[in-house]
């Protein structure tokens, strides 16, 4: 039997990047999947990609920053697919901006989508799971929730808050049989990440510099992050809650070989 057979999953930010990779991995493992993304995103393309795996797929256009839209998305998914017991709370945006140049509008935009949106999805997931006393939720944070990087002060504020929210929600929901964890992706080749290089003089050189900062000397693939999410949502992680899994090629914990100290190769 496949890992997620007879499960119903909902994934936000699922039209591209890590969300799409996770939705596809869940579908491949037998789950019925509701994919949620902004109405203007390519939901039709994402749905077609998932349907190749033969399971039920529902595409819902919704802005996670709108609590009414989030509730409506959950209600529709439960009506058409059945009781939701796995949620990847993934939708987010990234805006690179030096601290003193970050406008109120940019900060508010990051907070609305990354923090408030994640809260609304988490709250709705808990609301539908609590009466059934079962379920698993994975919030997408970031390696930048646990390390600093210039140009990301506002972004890291939202991602660090997601880790704090994950721990508190896990403590509160454990007695109802609901597990809450987070995944902290490192540098990953997603449309959102690649968009950060728009307008730079030499994107390939910048990407190479990014890869060089990773102990494994490469940028991650969304499918690699998706495997971490599926593990945390699956019964294999039945005794795991209130923590985060960092998938960053060692960037936050390992100095790349040869960057300092004595070379060993």
Image: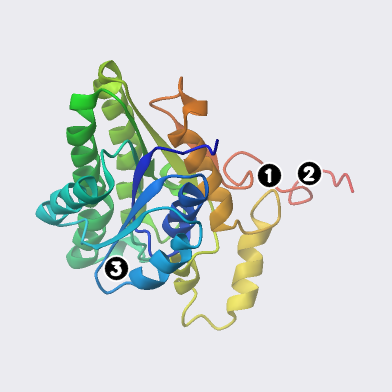
- Pair 1/2: label in front: 1
Mark 1 lies on a secondary structure that is: loop
How far apart are the alpha carbons under marks 3 and 1? 31 Å
How far apart are the alpha carbons under marks 3 and 2? 36 Å
Q: Position of residue 45 (x, y in %)?
A: 41, 72
Q: Residue at label 2? A: 261
Asked if residue 187 can be seen in this view, the reply is no
- Point out which mark residue 101 bears: 3
Asked whether, in this view, residue 139 is left or right of residue 5, the answer is left
Classify 59 as above or below 168: below
Q: Residue at label 1? A: 255
Q: Residues within 10 Å of mark 3 (few under 14, many from 20)?
A: few
Classify 104 as above or below 254: below
Image point (45%, 41%), residue name: 183
Asked whether, in this view, residue 95 is left or right of residue 148, the answer is left
Quadrant in which residue 61 is drawn: bottom left
Quadrant in which residue 120 is drawn: top left
Q: Nearer the viewer, residue 264 or 38?
A: 38
Classify 69 as above or below 3: below
Which of disc 1 and disc 3 is earlier in sequence? 3
Which of disc 2 and disc 3 is earlier in sequence? 3
């Amino acid at each position: 039997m496949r890992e997620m057979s007879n499960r119903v999953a909902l994934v936000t930010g699922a039209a591209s990047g890590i969300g799409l990779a996770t939705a596809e991995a869940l579908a491949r493992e037998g789950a019925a999947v509701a994919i949620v993304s902004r109405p203007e995103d390519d939901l039709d393309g994402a749905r077609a990609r998932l349907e190749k795996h033969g399971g039920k797929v529902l595409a819902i256009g919704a802005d996670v920053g709108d609590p009414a839209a989030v509730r409506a998305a959950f209600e529709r998914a439960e009506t058409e697919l059945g009781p939701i017991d796995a949620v990847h709370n993934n939708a987010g945006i990234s805006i690179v901006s030096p601290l003193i140049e970050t406008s109120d509008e940019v900060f508010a935009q990051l907070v609305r989508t990354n923090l408030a949106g994640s809260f609304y999805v988490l709250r709705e997931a808990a609301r539908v799971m609590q009466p059934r006393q079962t379920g698993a939720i994975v919030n997408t944070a970031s390696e930048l929730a646990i390390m600093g990087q210039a140009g990301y002060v506002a972004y890291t504020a939202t991602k660090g808050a997601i880790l704090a929210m994950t721990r508190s929600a896990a403590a509160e929901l454990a007695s109802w049989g609901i597990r809450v964890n987070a995944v902290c992706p490192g540098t990953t080749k997603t449309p959102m990440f690649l968009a950060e290089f728009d307008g730079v003089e030499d994107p390939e050189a910048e990407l190479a510099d990014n890869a060089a900062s990773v102990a494994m000397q490469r940028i991650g693939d969304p499918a690699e992050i998706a495997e971490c999410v599926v593990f945390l949502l699956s019964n294999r992680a039945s005794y795991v809650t209130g923590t985060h899994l960092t998938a960053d090629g060692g960037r936050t914990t390992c100095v790349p070989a040869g960057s300092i100290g004595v070379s060993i190769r």
